[in-house]
């Protein structure tokens, strides 16, 4: 039986952030860690965010996930934004290397303020109570997602170009075995089992076979530093400005670009599916937001990292992006997400409505590497 997480105020009481004992508010949105906003007892307007890694997923206590994931997030934040003075020496080295990473206007990541490996937890800069990309997109009168999608595309292109250029230096810090083990179980045991049982795809065993072989294929592709879990919940939008924030780097890894490019494109596509109720993604799977993301990614990396672009964006990775988008869509549908007809399955149960039929048709086509993949746009 899993133990409840420690109280966040107890976590920080012996640190330089002990004054943040005024109040603690649990934050929602993430699925992996326990996260709180802590207010200063001296000045309640001053806040920080505390993230604690239990040895299992916060949203699924029966699913083990090594607490080492917090070290990977802390390393990534040190690379992107600098290391606190009391951090391990490797963090200072990563911070120096990260000074060579080009910045992207309007994109922020929280600063790492404290890392405690023994618990393990981090204290982060609080970027405010901002809506996630998918929540913001569904608000009445929400603006076009294209500018945000393009911002993410530019930032991601610079990350991948930088990561490819400095791959030898980064590999020792970001070979994320715990994340790989969790994702392999997610794709292998869970998704394949659900695909085999779902009525609309159970008659197509080749889909399960393709999902099972995917991990081996992706390991042979050209690699770089990836965000690892760049989904719509990891992007926060500021309705009052063009700023966006990126969160949750515990899956940062050395991998093929499909891990980020296809993952984020899939979520942009699914957001469009939910919001544009008359559109069928099997007719046009590349809405304007997806096109803006891919075009900005291609243009930025080709201009700023031409050698990395030539190595990372190739027929092999286009095929991986294609299959992974199908896997991503199938996984979410079979977990009960992205319904636009107000059908609400039990937690974790697959969609069984018309939405599932539409999205699983798309997923099957992409898992089978449809020749008109939207990722062909990256080679234009």
Image (cartoon, rainbow, N blue to C red):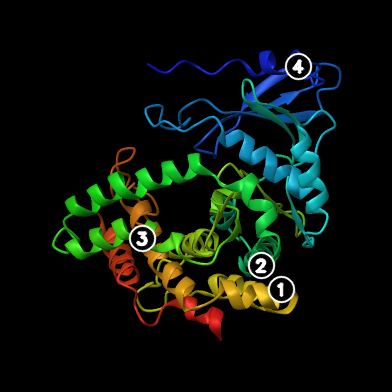
Residues marked 4 and 1 touching at CB (< 8 Å): no
| Other residues around mark 2 within 10 Å, as few (<14) / some (14–19) / many (≥20) | many
Q: Residue 157 carries which label?
A: 2
Q: Nearer the viewer, mark 4 or mark 3?
A: 3
Residue farthest bottom in this picture: 380
- Residue at the far left in the pictured view: 203
- Badge 1 marks a residue whose secondary structure is loop
Sequence order check: which comes first, mark 4 or mark 1?
A: 4
- Distance in Å between CA atoms under marks 2 and 3: 23 Å
Q: Marks 4 and 3: CB-CB under 8 Å?
A: no
Q: Nearer the viewer, residue 312 or 190?
A: 312
Q: How crowded is mark 1: few (under 14 residues within 10 Å), some or many (20 or more)?
A: some
Looking at the image, tell me whether mark 4 or mark 2 is earlier in sequence order: 4
Residue holding disc 4? 22
Q: Is residue 40 above or below residue 352?
A: above
Sequence-earlier tag: 4 or 3: 4
Dot 4 lies on which element? Answer: loop
Relative side of 182 to 95, left or right: left
- The residue drawn where x is 81% and y is 59% is 100
33 over 241 or under it: above or below: above
Q: Residue 305 carries which label?
A: 1
At mark 2, the secondary structure is helix
- Which residue in the protein does label 3 denote? 214
């Amino acid at each position: 039986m899993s133990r409840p997480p420690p109280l966040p105020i107890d976590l920080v009481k012996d640190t330089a952030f002990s004054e943040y004992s005024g109040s603690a508010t649990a934050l929602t949105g993430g699925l992996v860690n326990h996260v709180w906003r802590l207010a200063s007892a001296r000045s309640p307007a001053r806040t920080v965010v505390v993230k604690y890694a239990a040895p299992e997923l916060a949203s699924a206590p029966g699913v083990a996930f090594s607490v080492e994931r917090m070290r990977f997030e802390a390393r990534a934040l040190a690379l992107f934004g600098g290391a606190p003075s009391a951090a391990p020496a490797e963090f200072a080295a990563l911070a120096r290397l990260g000074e060579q990473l080009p910045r992207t206007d309007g994109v922020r990541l929280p600063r790492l303020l404290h890392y405690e490996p023994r618990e393990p937890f981090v204290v982060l800069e609080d970027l405010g109570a901002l809506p996630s990309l998918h929540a913001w997109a569904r608000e009445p009168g929400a603006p076009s997602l294209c500018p945000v999608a393009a911002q993410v595309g530019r930032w991601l292109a610079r990350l991948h170009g930088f990561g490819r250029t400095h791959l030898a230096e980064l590999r020792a810090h970001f070979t994320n075995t715990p994340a790989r083990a969790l994702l392999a179980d997610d794709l292998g045991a869970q998704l394949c089992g659900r695909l085999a049982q779902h009525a609309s795809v159970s008659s197509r065993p080749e889909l399960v076979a393709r999902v099972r072989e995917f991990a081996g294929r992706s390991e042979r592709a050209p690699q770089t530093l990836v965000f690892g879990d760049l989904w719509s919940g990891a992007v926060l939008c500021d309705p009052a400005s063009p700023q966006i924030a990126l969160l949750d780097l515990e899956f940062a890894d050395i991998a093929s670009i499909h891990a980020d490019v296809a993952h984020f494109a899939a979520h942009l596509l699914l957001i469009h599916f939910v919001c544009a109720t008359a559109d069928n993604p099997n007719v046009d799977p590349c809405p304007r937001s997806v096109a803006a993301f891919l075009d900005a990614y291609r243009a930025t990396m080709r201009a700023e990292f031409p050698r990395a672009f030539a190595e990372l964006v190739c027929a092999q990775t286009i095929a991986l992006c294609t299959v992974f988008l199908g896997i991503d869509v199938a996984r979410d549908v079979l977990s009960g997400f992205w319904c636009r007809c107000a059908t609400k399955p039990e937690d974790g149960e697959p969609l069984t409505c018309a939405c599932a039929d539409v999205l699983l048709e798309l997923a099957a086509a992409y898992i089978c590497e449809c020749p008109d993949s939207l990722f062909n746009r990256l080679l234009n």
